[in-house]
Image (cartoon, helix red, strand yellow):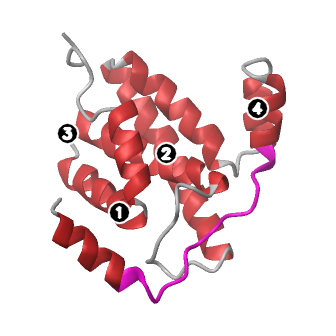
Amino acid sequence: MTDSTRENLLASQGTVAATKLPEDPAAAELSERGAAGFLEIVTRHPESSLCWALLAEGALQQNTPDLNITAYAYARTGYHRGLDALRRAGWKGSGPVPWEHVPNRGFLRCLWALAVAAHRIGEESEAKRCAQFLRDSSFTAYDELTETLPMEAPGKAGE
């Protein structure tokens, strides 16, 4: 992406207020308990995109065909739960969703995990759409997430 593309996107978003999700109750529980009781926390908070992102990222780390499909399902669930939350927070389908606002990170992580999982299962149009949606939502998130969870994992699934 060129600097002029970034400038144009930012200019078009200048009139749209950034969407900031409310605190995620699961995040506090996860920070208190860590991995202990993780599935209990997910069960108590199925609306938490952060929980779904963690499940998806864990499956993507394994990079096997079956777990890439599992990651796709987890990420898609968190993505849709996140879209619901964004709409409740006033999002109208476009505009910035800043990474800097910590409660937004679950949704943004699901969006990137969905892009990665879609790519790994050969759903290229969805992978590209999700990657572009992430860039349009938050340049910072795109830069951070593409570095921590690259589209191409070391060693291809099924090898």
Q: Secondary structure at mark 2?
A: helix
Kindly indicate whether the residue at mark 4 contacts the one at mark 2 (C-beta within 8 angstroms).
no
Amino acid found under the numbered disc labelled 2 = Arg
Q: Is residue 13 left or right of residue 109?
A: left
| Residue picked out by circle 2 | 109
Position of 94 compared to 92: left or right? left
Count neighbours of disc 3 (C-alpha within 10 A) and say few if under 14, some if 14 to 19, many if 20 or more: few
Q: Look at 60% across and 69% down and name the residue there.
A: 86
Q: What secondary structure is found at the residue carrying circle 4? A: helix
Type of residue at label 4? Answer: Leu
Q: What residue would you read off at disc 1?
A: 133
Q: Which residue is mark 4?
A: 30
Marks 3/1: CA distance? 18 Å
* Placement of the C terminus among the 4 image quadrants: top left
* Residue marked by disc 3: 122
Answer yes or no: do the residues labelled 3 and 1 have beta carbons within 8 Å?
no
Magenta span covers which residues?
A: 12-26
Cα distance, mark 4 to mark 1? 27 Å
